[in-house]
Amino acid sequence: MRHRISVLLWLLASWICIYATHSFANEEKVQGIIGNTSTGETLTTHAEHHGLKRNLGYSNFLEGWLTPWKPYVEDEIQAPRVPLLRITPAFFKREVRFNYIYVDDEHQGEADVNEWGLALELPLTLRFKLDIEPKVLHADTAKHGESAGFGDTKLALRAMLLESETFSLSTGSVINVPTGDEDRELGEGITTVGQQLAYWMDMGHRVSIHTFLGVDVPTGGNHRKDADMDFLYGVALSKTITIKENPCIHGITPFIELNGHKEFGLDKSEDEHKAEDESEHKAEGIGEKYMVDILPGVRFDLPHELYVLAGFEIPLNGTEEFDKRVWFSIIKDF
């Protein structure tokens, strides 16, 4: 079952790349035809007042790297480009995000953790974006009691590969800096670097799909028990329901995320080896570990580009990392 999930996700990623290339080629042809008509002038005027029409592809791959970023064109027909809770977004938004996560029974009941995070996303151009995400943690552990302070900091530089009005395909280089105090359970004490690939597609009727693949590689730290490499993946589906003539809520978006990762190169202890079935251990390889979580949630689209999200995450394959997570997020575009 675990291998099937990885295979399905790889097949989905391959299909997305093929679909994106085919869709973008067709869209360039349609825009070339429209550009010579009066309708093309109308679209240009609409873009000037409501944002920039995206047309970034292989044919103009050298363009957009120095073009100032502008908001997306959005209406009541297209699915809005708004991030969800955990999965990495493929599109670029200029926003500030406040995150709160409550982790229940982390590490077999040793800790209940309250995590506050503040993320800043700054598109530098149409092709480049900078993400900064520091954390403030409050941890209640059986060993150290209550501790509060700064956690680890994540930095990312992302590049847009392909983008049109209906899809976005981007990649990003990520580094996690261990700025938190590991002795007080406020940080992992490990520096990791990674590479990510994310895709978003408008499927019509305000339905959108988000997919994500990535790897994380530890480059510093004192724990040999940590994996040599983490393979990350995720897929999410969302549906926006428009609420007309309501001054408080413009839309409601239920969504569901499936996120997971596989760890390679774990140096397991003797107790873990004894508890593990020998045949499964040989089949999967030495020191491999799967974790898959499901995260249903809802997003409320408020006036002035303000969004409120809430979700409830539970593990699917009996991981001992946590029993459940409660997510709450506030996003403000600017």
Image: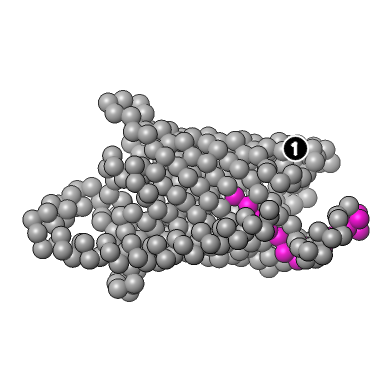
Near-viewer residue (46 or 57): 57
Is residue 184 a member of the stretch shown in magenta?
no
Does residue 175 appear in the picture of this structure?
A: no
5 to 116, vertically: above or below: below
The answer to whether residue 24 is left or right of residue 136 is left
- Crowd class of label 1 (few under 14; some 14 to 19; many from 20; radius 10 Å): some
Q: Residue at x 84, y 41 (%)?
A: 143
The image shows residue 144 at horizontal and vertical percentages of 81, 41
The image shows residue 292 at horizontal and vertical percentages of 65, 49
Residue 18 placement: quadrant: bottom left
Q: Residue at x 68, y 44 (%)?
A: 316
Is residue 264 a member of the stretch shown in magenta?
yes
Q: Amino acid at mark 1?
A: Asp
Q: Residue at x 33, y 33 (%)?
A: 242
Counting the numbered discs, the total is 1
308 to 150, vertically: above or below: above
Residue 178 placement: quadrant: bottom right
The residue stretch that appears in magenta:
259-274
Kindly state the secondary structure of the residue where label 1 is placed: strand
Q: Residue at x 9, y 59 (%)?
A: 37
The answer to whether residue 17 is left or right of residue 163 is right
The image shows residue 6 at horizontal and vertical percentages of 62, 59
Near-viewer residue (24 or 96): 24
| Residue most extreme to the left | 38
Residue bearing the label numbered 1: 105
The image shows residue 126 at horizontal and vertical percentages of 34, 62
Does residue 69 appear in the picture of this structure?
A: yes
